[in-house]
Image (cartoon, coloured by chain):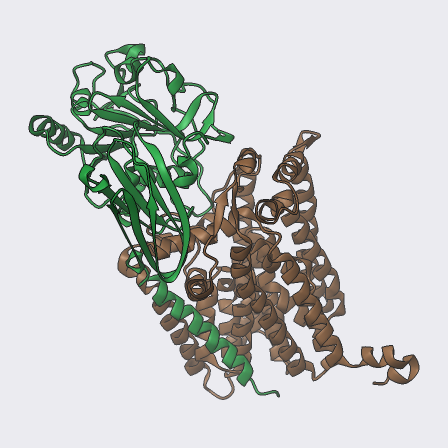
């Protein structure tokens, strides 16, 4: 009989690895990272720190005349009929329904630096939007992934609260279905009052992808945001073809493109903005939604510069002389590349850049 | 050294088992280290990146989508991140525009996200280390069982050169080699009468990948029968169960506390349940039934064992229980958990087991190649430039070509699964044929009768 000490040693080592890993898994978090940015004499000065080894990206953006939202409503009301398609998920994964999507989105927004949001039902949302319109002040975002807006804010009439709210400076982030095609009520889905003309209420033209075309095979390289923000969702079902928007409409398409439809399109609407993200529910889509909300890019955005780097168990800082243009300047710093683990947004006042 | 005189230096070298062992291990390492940075299965290895992303962003294993297994592999990845923190890689992967077309393939488990060479190596080095640890344990166990160094080296070679073992740790980066390591450690711990440690290891093995669950009854029957005579059987079984319960509680405590316990078992439940089509669903449920019946039958077979060589029967019944369990899903990597026990049987008792070893390892390897085919080259295309992304994509698309209405990769996978099935059935055939005619009484009657008569061979 041989001594089994070597075997016991292997077993103990393996169990120790498992238990140490368990402690790491449940104590790790985005507190491992930090970032800061400021503008001094027109130059962007940034600093990124990490307790691990990561790539980081600094995206400096000129948002033109648009005021980025500081807080968000996330619409979710289990009592109102949704209009999204079920999707296949990996073996063992939870069904990606609206509730699970919203729960995950909250977490994703949180660690990427957008912490001021509240989840609201249909009635509460209508009250909040009405109050926003009356109060004015800081612009807000509405994230709706239900595939159909609730009847409390949208019925298919040009005078609906949703239009008034966006026009006054709100930002609608939309996905899950054709925007405006259905009205969600507690009793089910209804047709909008505008009938087939629902798209014109939002965009002034029929520009949404109503067909089956879904997968985009090419990236939009003209503005650089796909690479700068590590965008992943290449689906264009329900998406906008910006070329069909009325002349003079400000818009920005980022991500991936197929047949004129873009995976993400921002369209100006009064003082506010509508952002449509294409495709049925997916984790890539959720990642992109979080990334664009957290970076606050909009229909007037253009990249001033994006800087990639690497940080390992310490800090990295840099300074870049930038030509900001005349619009609202901002920087979004995120760590992890296509696997973001941390993000922070920095908005700069006009006098900081001069 | 007996061969040395007849065949000179070469013969002497062949006769030197230590030299052969070094050569085998070196060759096995070289093959794995050659593949590790170059070839990878996109979907799985991207998933491991997502797991690390989730934990680094404060979402542990189950708060957001990305990790679907029971928690132990996630914990191991958590430990691995210590090295990633220290040494990198900093860049884990990118989304390749040139490869987007692969997300439209018939086999849905592909992604155009390709992982960096550094990340491939980071994930695979621990798996390769596990391969080596399993090799060591196989060597140790065969030596312990037979005292024959040559048999031990032969067994090590069968493990390290097994195509599916090389593939899973060196290429695909699935953690079934860790599963094999835990299973083997569990088996040895009970064999060495270390019931507390064995119970703890068994719990960890089950919470890594669920197949060892089907060995619980065989193990308890072995411990019970072994200590029946000295009267310690209840204490020993209780000790084993205590070890299991304690380790199980420690491992799933976080999920109990944060309400994600069911998420931790979603993959295991999904594997045995519904799937992409009715045929696979029936196959999964049927497989689960075979596994459960096997679990009970082989435990009874263990319990009724009479004779001196109880330990041989123990290892044999563990092998049979695992072979039945693998029918839950004939996914290529799952056979790895039983390979060390198959090799043990082959090296110590039954050379004819070379037939199932060959059929299973080649069949599962073929199956993996059929499903993943040219996608294995995507990292090599994106980060090393060894091939072009267009070449890899064209190769993948060619596997969707149909013959008699069935896609090429399904033809190959089907043939591969057939070989794998024949191999699994051959294990049972060899064991039961050697045992002679089937028992005149079914094993449960034997147990009942023995128990009634107060026999100590229950």
Q: Residue at x 67, y 81 (%)?
A: B143
Q: Nearer the viewer, residue B117 or A65?
A: A65
Q: Residue at x 52, y 30 (%)?
A: A217
Q: Is residue B426 above or below residue B380?
A: below
Q: Residue at x 56, y 51 (%)?
A: B329
Position of residue B183 in the picture relative to residue B365 (left or right): left
Q: Is residue A184 above or below residue B211?
A: above
Question: Residue A28 placed where, x, y %?
Answer: 33, 61
Q: Which chain is brown?
A: B
Position of residue B274 in the picture relative to residue A267 (left or right): right
Q: Which chain is green?
A: A
Question: Residue B153 placed where, x, y %?
Answer: 71, 75
Q: Could you say which quadrant of the image residue A326 lies in?
A: top left
Q: Is residue B441 visible?
A: no
Quarter of the picture holding the C terminus of chain A:
top left
Position of residue B115 in the picture relative to residue A301 (left or right): right
Q: Residue at x 65, y 35 (%)?
A: B394
Q: Is residue A96 above or below residue B296?
A: above
Quarter of the picture holding the N terminus of chain A:
bottom right
């Amino acid at each position: 009989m041989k001594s089994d000490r070597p075997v016991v040693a292997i077993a103990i080592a393996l169990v120790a690895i498992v238990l140490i890993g368990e402690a790491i898994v449940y104590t790790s978090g985005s507190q491992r990272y930090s970032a800061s940015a400021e503008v001094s004499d027109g130059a962007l000065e940034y600093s990124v720190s990490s307790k691990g080894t990561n790539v980081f990206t600094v995206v400096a953006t000129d948002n033109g005349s648009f005021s980025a939202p500081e807080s968000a409503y996330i619409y979710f009301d289990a009592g109102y009929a949704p209009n999204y398609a079920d999707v296949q998920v990996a073996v063992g994964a939870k069904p990606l329904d609206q509730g699970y999507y919203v729960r995950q989105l909250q977490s994703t927004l949180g660690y990427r630096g957008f912490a001021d949001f509240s989840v609201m039902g249909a009635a509460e949302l209508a009250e909040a939007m009405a109050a926003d319109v009356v109060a004015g002040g800081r612009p807000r975002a509405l994230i709706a992934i239900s595939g159909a807006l609730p009847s409390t804010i949208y019925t298919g009439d040009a005078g609906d609260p949703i239009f008034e709210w966006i026009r006054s400076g709100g930002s609608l982030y939309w996905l899950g279905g054709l925007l405006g095609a259905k009205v969600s009520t507690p009793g089910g889905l209804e047709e909008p009052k505008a009938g087939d003309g629902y798209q014109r209420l939002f965009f002034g033209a029929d520009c949404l992808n109503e067909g089956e075309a879904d997968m985009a095979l090419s990236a939009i390289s003209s503005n650089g945001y796909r690479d700068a923000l590590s965008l992943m969702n290449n689906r264009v079902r329900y998406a906008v073809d910006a070329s069909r928007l009325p002349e003079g409409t400000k818009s920005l398409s980022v991500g991936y493109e197929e047949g004129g439809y873009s995976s993400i399109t921002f369209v100006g609407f009064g003082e506010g903005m509508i952002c449509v993200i294409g495709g049925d529910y997916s984790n890539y889509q959720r990642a992109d939604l979080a990334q664009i909300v957290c970076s606050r890019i909009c229909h007037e955005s253009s990249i001033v510069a994006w800087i990639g780097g690497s940080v390992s168990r310490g800090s990295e800082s840099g300074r870049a002389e930038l030509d900001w243009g005349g619009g609202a300047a901002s920087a979004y710093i995120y760590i992890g590349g296509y696997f973001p683990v941390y993000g922070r947004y920095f908005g700069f006042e006009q006098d900081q850049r001069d | 050294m007996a061969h040395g005189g007849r065949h000179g230096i070469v013969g002497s070298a062949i006769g030197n088992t230590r030299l052969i062992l070094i050569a085998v291990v070196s060759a096995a390492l070289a093959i794995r280290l050659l593949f590790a940075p170059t070839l990878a299965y996109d979907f799985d290895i991207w998933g491991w990146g997502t797991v690390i992303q989730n934990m680094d962003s404060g979402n542990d294993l189950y708060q957001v989508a990305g990790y679907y297994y029971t928690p132990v592999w996630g914990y191991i990845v958590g430990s691995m991140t210590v090295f990633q923190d220290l040494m990198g890689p900093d860049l884990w992967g990118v989304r390749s525009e040139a490869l987007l077309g692969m997300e439209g393939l018939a086999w849905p488990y592909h992604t155009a996200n390709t992982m960096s060479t550094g990340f491939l190596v980071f994930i695979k080095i621990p798996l390769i280390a596990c391969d080596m640890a399993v090799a060591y344990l196989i060597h140790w166990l065969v030596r312990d069982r037979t005292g024959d160094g040559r048999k031990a080296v032969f067994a090590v070679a069968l493990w390290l050169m097994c195509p599916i073992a090389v593939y899973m740790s060196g290429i695909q980066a699935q953690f079934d080699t860790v599963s094999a390591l835990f299973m083997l450690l569990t088996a040895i711990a009970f064999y060495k009468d270390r019931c507390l440690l064995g119970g703890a290891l068994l719990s960890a093995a089950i919470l890594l990948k669920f197949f060892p669950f089907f060995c619980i009854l065989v193990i308890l029957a072995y411990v019970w029968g072994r200590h029946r005579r000295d009267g310690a059987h209840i204490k020993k079984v209780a000790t084993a169960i205590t070890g299991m319960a304690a380790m199980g509680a420690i491992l799933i405590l976080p999920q109990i506390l944060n309400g994600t316990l069911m998420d931790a078992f979603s993959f295991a439940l999904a594997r045995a349940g519904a799937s992409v089509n009715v045929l696979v669903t029936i196959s999964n449920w049927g497989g689960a039934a075979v596994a459960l019946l096997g679990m009970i039958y082989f435990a009874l077979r263990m319990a009724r064992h009479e004779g001196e060589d109880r330990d041989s029967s123990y290892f044999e019944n563990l092998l049979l229980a695992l072979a039945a369990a693998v029918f839950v899903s004939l996914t290529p990597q799952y056979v790895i958990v039983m390979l060390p026990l198959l090799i043990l049987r082959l090296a110590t008792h039954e050379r004819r087991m070379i037939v199932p070893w060959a059929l299973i390892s080649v069949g599962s390897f073929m199956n993996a190649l059929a499903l993943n085919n040219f996608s294995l080259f995507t990292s090599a295309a994106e980060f090393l430039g060894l091939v072009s992304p267009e070449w890899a994509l064209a190769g993948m698309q060619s596997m969707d070509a149909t013959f008699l209405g069935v896609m090429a990769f399904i033809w190959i996978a089907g043939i591969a699964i057939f070989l794998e099935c024949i191999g699994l059935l051959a294990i049972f055939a060899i064991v039961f044929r050697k045992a002679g005619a089937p028992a005149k009484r079914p094993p449960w009657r034997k147990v009942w009768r023995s128990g009634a008569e107060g026999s100590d061979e229950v």
